C-alpha cells in the first residue's frame, strides 16, 4: 500500500496526537484498565481512518483520446443537461461524482490536452451533494482542450468536511489522461461537463474508479 504525499503531515500529526493521548492516560490513570483499552481502540481507529483516506494505489492507465476517464473514485450522483456559465457558456452534459471519506481522494485528468483555463474559487462548505455546492462551495475549475479542439471542463468541489483543495495544473500546461491533477481532503465532489453528443457510459448511483472507469465517449468533433 502506498500513500499520497498530501497525507504525510496529517499522518504525522495523527501519530503525535495518539502518542500524547496514550501517554496522558498512562500517566494520569495508570490503574484504569478500561480507560486504557478504550484509548487503545480509539487510537487504532483514528490511525486506520487516516491511513485509508490517504492511500494512493498504483493503477494502470489505458489512454484513449476518444474516451473520458473518471477523475475520481466515488458514486455518480448527477447526470443531466445543464448550462455551464463560467467558461463554456453553453449547454453541456454534467456528470457529478461524490467522494465519501472512505474513497481514494486522488483526482486524475479525464482527457489529455492543453489546460486552457484554471481558476480557484473560495466559498462555502455545503454538503457535497447539495444542489448549490457546484456554485457556492470552495472549488477549482479546470478546462482541458484535446488535440481536436474539444474542451472538457471539470471542478473540484469541497464538501462539508473538506477544508483543503490541492491542484497541480496551470494554464498552458500539457497534461496526460489519467495523471494526477489534484487532491481534496475529507469528502468532496468532482463535476465534469461534456459536449452535447457525448455518449455517457455510466448510470446514476454507479460506483466508479478514478483513472479506470470510462464516463463517456466524446463526439468525433466539437458540436
Image (cartoon, rainbow, N blue to C red):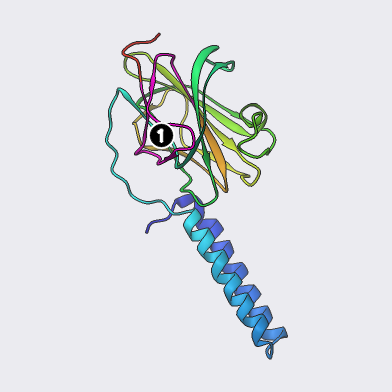
Quadrant housing the N terminus: bottom left
> Which residue is at the far bottom?
31
- Identified at 47% across, 57% down, the residue is 52
Local crowd at mark 1 within 10 Å, few (<14), some, or many (≥20)? many
Total count of labels: 1
Q: In this orientation, which residue lies closer to the viewer: 162 or 168?
A: 162
Q: Quadrant of the C terminus?
A: top left
Residue at 42%, 17% (x, y): give it: 151
Tell me residue 134's x, y (percent): 61, 29
Q: Residue at x 57, y 45 (%)?
A: 187
Stretch in magenta = 192-217
Whether residue 86 is in magenta: the answer is no
Report the side of 198 relative to 135 (left or right): left
- Which residue appears farthest toward the right when viewing the image? 28
> Is 167 rendered above or below residue 117?
below
Relative side of 96 to 159, left or right: left
For disc 1, the marked residue is 70
Q: Give SS at disc 1.
A: loop
Specify whether residue 214 is painted magenta: yes
For image coordinates 64% across by 47% down, the residue present is 161
Q: Position of residue 119 (x, y in %)?
A: 56, 26
Q: Is residue 58 above or below residue 95?
A: below
Residue 91 location, x and y as percent?
A: 52, 13
142 and 99: which one is in front? Answer: 99
Amino acid at each position: 500500500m502506498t500513500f499520497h504525499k498530501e497525507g504525510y503531515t496529517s499522518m504525522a500529526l495523527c501519530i503525535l496526537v495518539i502518542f500524547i493521548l496514550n501517554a496522558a492516560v498512562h500517566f494520569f490513570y495508570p490503574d484504569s484498565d478500561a480507560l486504557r483499552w478504550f484509548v487503545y481502540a480509539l487510537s487504532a481507529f483514528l490511525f486506520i481512518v487516516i491511513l485509508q483516506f490517504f492511500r494512493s494505489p498504483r493503477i494502470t492507465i489505458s489512454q484513449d483520446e476518444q474516451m473520458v476517464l473518471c477523475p475520481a473514485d466515488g458514486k455518480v450522483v448527477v447526470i443531466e443537461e445543464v448550462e455551464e456559465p463560467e467558461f463554456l457558456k453553453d449547454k453541456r452534459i454534467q456528470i457529478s461524482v461524490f467522494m465519501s471519506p472512505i474513497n481514494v481522494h486522488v483526482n486524475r485528468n479525464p482527457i489529455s490536452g492543453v489546460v486552457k483555463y484554471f481558476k480557484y474559487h473560495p466559498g462555502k462548505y455545503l454538503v457535497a451533494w447539495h444542489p448549490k455546492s457546484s456554485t457556492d462551495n470552495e472549488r477549482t475549475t479546470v478546462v482541458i482542450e484535446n488535440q481536436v479542439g474539444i474542451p472538457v471542463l471539470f471542478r473540484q468541489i469541497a464538501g462539508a468536511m473538506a477544508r483543503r483543495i490541492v491542484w497541480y495544473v496551470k494554464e498552458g500546461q500539457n497534461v496526460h489522461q489519467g495523471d494526477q491533477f489534484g487532491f481534496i481532503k475529507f469528502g468532496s465532489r468532482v463535476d465534469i461537463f461534456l459536449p452535447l453528443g457525448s455518449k455517457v457510459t455510466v448510470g446514476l448511483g454507479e460506483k466508479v474508479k478514478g483513472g479506470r472507469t470510462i464516463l463517456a465517449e466524446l463526439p468525433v468533433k466539437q458540436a
